[in-house]
Structure formats: structure tokens, C-alpha cells
Amino acid sequence: MTEGLNTMAYLVSGLFFILSLGGLSKQETARKGNIYGILGMALAILATFASGEVENFKLLIPLMLGGAGIGAVLAKRV
């Protein structure tokens, strides 16, 4: 991925995070806010992987899976 495209992906993911915060401010729009947050994080992760700067996938993948597992357990409690 070119550096400009990678920067654009990070900017768009930041926009999704801002939209997520706005969506989470009201109960009626919380579902949409969560979707924006998920899209923002997915785009940021993909941009990071595509940047070519990640060197230690053996450490990164298990940590991401562990974080996703903890998040799933906590989300079910809400």
C-alpha cells in the first residue's frame, strides 16, 4: 500500500471513530455508533497490516485474538 493511501485509511478510520463517539452519545443511535467504531478499528488494523511496517506477526495475532475474546465476553454482559 502506498504511503498516501495508508495515510488516507488512517484519516478515514479516525473519522469513523469520531462518528462512533457521536453515535454512542444517545441510546437511539448507539447501534450505529458501535458499527462506526467497528469499521474504524477494522480499517485501522488493515492499514497497519498493509503498511509493511509490522514485523512480528507471531506476537501481534495472539494479542489481537485475546483482546477480541475479552471484548466479546464483556460485550455479552452489557
Image (cartoon, helix red, strand yellow):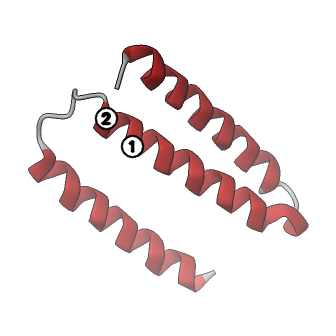
Q: Quadrant of the N terminus?
A: top left
Q: How many marks?
A: 2
Residue 8 image position (x, y, % from top left): 54, 23
**Residue topped by disc 1:** 46
Residue 39 drawn above or below residue 44: below
Label 2 – label 1 distance at C-alpha: 6 Å
Q: Which mark is residue 50?
A: 2
- The kind of residue tagged 1 is Leu
Going by the picture, which residue comes out furthest to the top? Answer: 4
Residue at image position (66%, 42%) is 16
Front residue of this view, candidates 11 and 71 = 11
Query: Is residue 19 rendered to the left or right of residue 35?
Result: right
User: Which of the pair 41/49 is nearer the observer?
Assistant: 49
User: Which corner quadrant of the image does residue 23 belong to?
Assistant: bottom right
Quick check: 54 above or below 61? Answer: above
* Mark carried by residue 61: none
**4 on left or right of 58:** right
Q: Which residue is depicted at the point 61% across and 32% down?
A: 12
Residue 30 spot, x, y in % from top left: 78, 64
Q: Amino acid at mark 2?
A: Ala
Where is 71 relative to 36, above or below?
Answer: below
Residue at the spot 39% in from the left edge and 43% down from the top edge: 46
Residue 33 x, y percent position in the rendering:
74, 57
Horizontal and vertical percent position of residue 52: 22, 29
Q: Is label 2 in a helix, a strand or a loop? A: helix
Label 1: state its secondary structure.
helix
Number of other residues with Cα within 10 Å of mark 2, as a class: few under 14, some 14 to 19, many 20 or more:
few
Which of the two residues, 22 or 74, is positioned nearer the viewer here?
A: 22
What residue appears at the point 71 percent right and 49 percent down from the top-left corner?
A: 20
Question: Are the two marked residues, 2 and 1, in contact with CB atoms closer than 8 angstroms?
Answer: yes
Residue 54 shown left or right of residue 9 in the figure: left
